[in-house]
Amino acid sequence: FYEEYPSRYSIDSSRRHRWIRGDWQIGNWFLPFVPAADKGFKKNSISALSRWKLFDNLRRSLVPIAMLILLVAGWTILSSPWLWTFMVLAVVFIPTLITSAWNIYWKPKEVTLTQHINNASILTSKSILQAAFSLMCLPYEALYSLDAITRTLWRINISGKNLLEWNPSGFMNQKQEGLVPTYRTMWIAPVLSILLIVYFLIESYQTTFIIAAPFLSLWILSPAIVNALSKPSSTSKSKLKESQKEYLRNLARKTWSFFADLV
């Protein structure tokens, strides 16, 4: 019942697709009244906090769709494309920057200043890269979120079938990986980019094209980048100094003593 953390983006997106389907399948349980056993309705007995969690799951699944619509509409039919582009960038990067600032500010007592600066720098760079990666994969994430939502609503309200469809992400490990299959899966990103480029050329939107060019370039290359990142990384064995070994032994002893005392 416990899954390993996904080793590839395709496995991660498949798992999140399954989670979104599950969230929308029980989504109506955030309402004050829920279906009863006798085909009527009864008062929802779930706590307000739990109902808020259910609602927040639904909200989170709509974020990629909303951001993609806001970007495309801001570049095509809305005025001030700079404003709408900046708003989407703010939604993606401001939480990351706030978390990074807190990590830099808060230094554990047992960590030296040099170690803290190195750790904070690594965490900050990783957080920024993860935010940029989510922005690069935004069209595909919007597509599979929309697919999961519409698929679930169809099954609940019309077909009534496959409501218990559930495959562990480990089943995805045998799936063929490669550049062509990745482009076939993430087709929405390059296709949308090409359509927008053609639209900008026809409408002579030079300023908007300059604003959108970095996004469109990333979206066209996103399947190739995802395919490259999904390949196994090379590993190397670190050679530790005596001082580093002593630090790790002390840390292990502290960890063990925590469980020895409290468990």
Image (cartoon, rainbow, N blue to C red):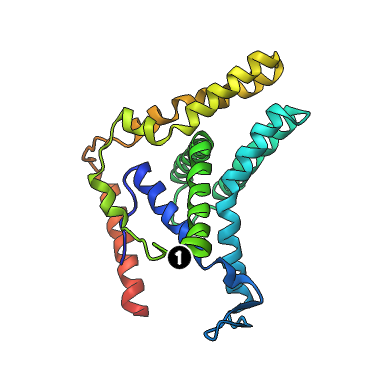
Please say whether residue 171 is visible from this viewpoint: yes
Give 19 or 88, whichever is nearer the viewer: 19
Q: Quadrant of residue 100?
A: top right
Residue that numbered label 1 is attached to: 160
Q: Is residue 39 left or right of residue 15?
A: right
Q: Is residue 152 above or below residue 190?
A: below
Q: Quadrant of residue 52?
A: bottom right
Q: Position of residue 240 (x, y in %)?
A: 24, 43
Give 183 or 110, whichever is nearer the viewer: 183
The residue drawn where x is 31% and y is 58% is 168
Q: Is residue 60 left or right of residue 258?
A: right
Q: Position of residue 226 (x, y in %)?
A: 39, 34
Q: Position of residue 211 (x, y in %)?
A: 66, 22
Please say whether residue 120 is visible from this viewpoint: no
Q: Quadrant of residue 212?
A: top right
Q: Is residue 118 above or below residue 184?
A: below
The residue drawn where x is 60% and y is 23% is 196
Report the quarter where the C terminus lies: bottom left
Tell which residue pokes out farthest to the bottom in this image: 38
The residue drawn where x is 66% and y is 14% is 202
Find numbered disc 1 in the image and state the secondary structure of the residue it sits on.
Answer: loop
Local crowd at mark 1 within 10 Å, few (<14), some, or many (≥20)?
A: few
Q: Position of residue 95 (x, y in %)?
A: 61, 47
Give 247 or 164, whichever is nearer the viewer: 164
Which amino acid lies under the numbered mark 1 shown in the image of this protein? Gly
Report the quarter where the N terminus lies: bottom left
